[in-house]
Image (cartoon, grey):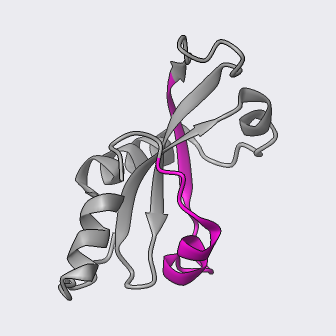
Amino acid sequence: MHGFSQRLPVYWLRDHLAAEATHCLFPTLVQRLTHHPETPLQWRCQQLLTVNTGEQIWGLLDVLPVTFDKIPETLDTASKKNIVSRIERAVKVREWMERMADGQSEETTSL
């Protein structure tokens, strides 16, 4: 997997994400693909995903602004700062996948 936008397959999401958990998407920068001018402007978002082990993992996802604008705003400033702090401490999707492939798992911690 690349360090940028992980286009995680739907089957991977079904197999690994905690279905009842809240997953967060935080826009970080504007993504212009100058080598693909036909591709519309996108927002590079950090995502904080809760996996079925209870851990939260960090990834990146490119989202069209019109799609992101349809997501209702539900968080106050303090909650957003908390999410950014959790993103900064979270293990990357790729690292989590490698650890799971090696049969390692961490103790679940309360956040």
Q: Is residue 63 above or below residue 12?
A: above
Q: Is residue 52 magenta?
A: no
**In the image, farthest residue toward the front:** 35
Q: Quadrant of residue 23?
A: bottom right
Tell me residue 66's x, y (percent): 79, 30
- Count of numbered tags: 0
Tell me residue 100's x, y (percent): 27, 80
Residue at the (39%, 49%) spot, across then down:
82
Q: Is residue 18 magenta?
A: yes
Q: Is residue 10 above or below residue 102?
A: above
Residue at the (72%, 37%) spot, across then down:
68
Nearest the camera: 75 or 92? 92
**Horizontal side, residue 45 vs residue 95: left or right:** right
Residue at the (82%, 40%) spot, across then down:
70
Residue at the (72%, 28%) spot, across then down:
65
Q: Is residue 45 above or below residue 53?
A: above
Magenta-drawn segment = 6-29
Tell me residue 78's x, y (percent): 46, 43
**Horizontal side, residue 56 vs residue 109: left or right:** right
Q: Quadrant of the C terminus?
A: bottom left
Tell me residue 99's x, y (percent): 21, 75
